Image: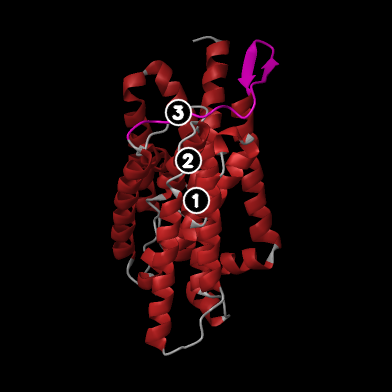
Amino acid sequence: MNFQIAALLGQDGITNGAIYALLALSIVLVFTVTRILLIPQGEFVSFGALTMGMMQNGQPLTVAWLLVALCLAAAACDVFDMWRSGRRRISLWLPAKLLYAALVTWAALALPWVSMPMLLQVAMTLLLLVPMGPLLYRIVFQPIASASPLVLLIVSIAAHVALVGVALLVFGPEGARTAPFTEASLEVGSLRLSSQALWVICVSLLLIVGLFVMFERTLYGKALRAAALNRMGARLMGISPVFAGKAMFFLASLIGVVSGVLIAPLTTIYYDSGFLISLKGFVGSIIGGLVSYPAAAIGAVAIGLIESFSTFWASAYKEIIVFVLIIPILLWRSLSSRHVEDEE
């Protein structure tokens, strides 16, 4: 190995690590607020990449019908809760969600997205997929929000399996790889940096900084931090756990879809590729103990670098090397942390 090879491997490792860091942050965000280990996070990644691939291949965006189905299911849950509580007044959010799903579905199926600029394709991908996060929480997790962490984990795994099956039905077994955002490259000495790698790193940094500013400077961000630090205290102060859960799933789906759009030009994504990607983000979040955002981000970047250099030294064992790292980390945390009862 010479300096040029090491630099190329480092570039790939940092690029992959930036994606893993985003996914690790989203897993930590959701877990600290809702106690849900978001196993389906990887599906948002694969859905984002495959939706962009369908647009650029001129295929109909049949994934829009999934948005319609989720909106109808969420509306049915709202109507049932309203009937059970004895309320007769329909919230304005109910027709608004159905109208949104109808308009976005019409735009997705009626307009020629293959000839649209890439910026509009990305925007439509976000409009189609990001709302599925809060809808998933409303349908699957909100009714059992007070259940034990084990029950939430089992339901999360079931949701992951169901979404993988939906992805196979909607997108098919073929993979997709999209066009890069730009074709330019940056040369630093003998090292050539691809523009897509720079896009991944820059957008990842912007999202991380944006999340930091939101949680540190905005009222809603501080409310969500309060819900993460003390769920019972947040409830007593009037912070809705339903709002907190939906907000966290919205952020998680946004991060997942953006990650899928970013990595689609770099590698071929299949309907079940998201699970392995998010699992590496989960390893990074374990390094942070599922509570520390900086440690999770640093751990995820380290995972990306280890994976990249493993492809040079032991390509056949790179996945094993990455996931074996979790064993000493779990052992160390088990021996060094104090075991306390859950506050609820």
Question: Going from the N terminus, do you reach mark 2 or mark 3 first?
Answer: 2
Judge whether residue 343 can be spotted in this image: no
Give the labeled residue for mark 2.
51
Residue ID at (65%, 10%): 190
Residue ID at (37%, 51%): 39
Residue count near mark 1 (Cα–Cα under 10 Å), binned few <14, some 14–19, many ≥20? many
Magenta stretch bounds: 173-194
Do residues under tags 1 and 2 come within 8 Å of each other at their CB atoms? yes
Residue ID at (30%, 52%): 162
Question: Going from the N terminus, do you reach mark 1 or mark 3 first?
Answer: 1
Q: Main secondary structure of the magenta part?
A: loop
Left or right position of 341 against 45: left
Pair 2/3: label in front: 2
Amino acid type for the residue under numbered disc 2: Thr
Give the labeled residue for mark 3.
306
Say whether residue 159 is magenta. no
Give the labeled residue for mark 1.
129
